[in-house]
């Protein structure tokens, strides 16, 4: 997997998410199709997140097989976000299918308070856990097990084959998120000034 995840190929994994942002940003000119565009963009974002955490789970599972020949804590920790995003993708599809195409009538008056129910709280907590697991925890668990190995040659080989691609994936995720956020901000500033 180390040869497959070169620097530029890692960034190719983020094409669905970037495409979702482009679809959402350029669909705002047409007021009639915003709901459909948001549904498509949301599906692309969830597919992108599922793809990225699946690649990291694959690397973690390969690392566990190479070091322990069984499923360890890093694999279980890596597959929880995969399971969550697979279920969340099914939820997004079901919401897109069951939500009517025409928006509800607008109500006049102050904005109503949002009651964050149990289901939405669970979604938020699992999303937060997935972010922490992807950005910090999986890399730390793999690095900790690599450092336990006494042989320096094996340690360097494990780090080169598993830890470096995982760090490359996290670095690319941070760069893409910051880059698309800056693009979104500058695009909105330019659009509002024209």
Image (cartoon, grey):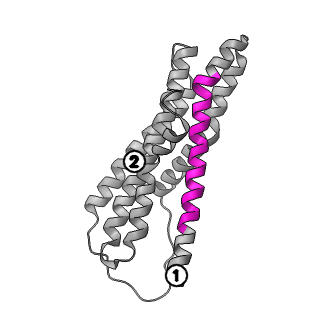
* Residue 29 located left or right of residue 80: left
Neighbours of disc 1 within 10 Å: few (<14), some (14-19), many (20+): few
Query: Mark 1 or 2 closer to N-term?
Result: 2
Kindly indicate the quadrant of the structure image that contains residue 154: top right
Tag in front: 1 or 2 = 1
Direction bottom: furthest residue: 108
Q: In this view, does 49 lie above or below 155?
A: below
* Residue depicted at 56% across the width and 54% down the height: 177
Q: What element carries label 1?
A: helix
| Circles 1 and 2: CB atoms closer than 8 Å | no
Where is residue 36 shown, x and y percent of the image?
Answer: 31, 66
Can residue 83 be found in the magenta stretch? no
Q: In this view, does 41 lie above or below 68?
A: below
Instruction: In this rendered view, identify the residue nearer to me: 151 or 82.
Output: 151
| Circle 2 residue | 47
Q: Is the magenta stretch mostly helix, strand or loop?
A: helix
Where is residue 168 shown, x and y percent of the image?
Answer: 59, 37
* Residue depicted at 50% across the width and 22% down the height: 62
Q: Is mark 2 on a helix, strand or loop?
A: helix
Instruction: In this rendered view, identify the residue nearer to me: 13 or 67.
Output: 13
Can residue 162 be found in the magenta stretch? yes
Q: Residue 192 carries which label?
A: 1
Where is residue 176 shown, x and y percent of the image?
Answer: 55, 52
Span of residues in magenta? 159-184
Count of labels shown?
A: 2
Neighbours of disc 2 within 10 Å: few (<14), some (14-19), many (20+): some
* Residue depicted at 38% across the width and 44% down the height: 87
Q: Residue 59 carries which label?
A: none
Q: Is residue 46 above or below residue 154?
A: below
Where is residue 24 shown, x and y percent of the image?
Answer: 41, 66
- The Cα–Cα distance between marks 1 and 2, rounded to whole angstroms, is 30 Å
């Amino acid at each position: 997997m180390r040869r497959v995840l070169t620097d530029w190929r890692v960034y190719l994994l983020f094409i669905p998410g970037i495409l979702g942002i482009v679809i959402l940003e350029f669909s705002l000119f047409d007021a009639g199709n915003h709901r459909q565009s948001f549904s498509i963009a949301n599906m692309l974002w969830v597919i992108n997140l599922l793809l990225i955490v699946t690649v990291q789970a694959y690397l973690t599972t390969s690392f566990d097989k190479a070091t322990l020949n069984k499923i360890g804590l890093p694999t279980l920790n890596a597959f929880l976000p995969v399971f969550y995003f697979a279920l969340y993708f099914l939820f997004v599809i079901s919401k897109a299918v069951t939500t009517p195409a025409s928006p509800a009538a607008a109500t006049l008056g102050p904005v109503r308070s949002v009651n964050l129910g149990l289901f939405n709280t669970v979604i938020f907590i699992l999303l937060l856990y997935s972010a922490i697991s992807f950005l910090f925890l999986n890399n730390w668990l793999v690095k900790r097990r690599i450092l336990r190995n006494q042989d320096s040659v094996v340690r360097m080989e494990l780090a080169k084959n598993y830890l470096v691609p995982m760090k490359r994936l996290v670095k690319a995720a941070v760069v893409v998120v910051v880059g698309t956020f800056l693009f979104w901000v500058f695009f909105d500033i330019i659009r509002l000034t024209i």
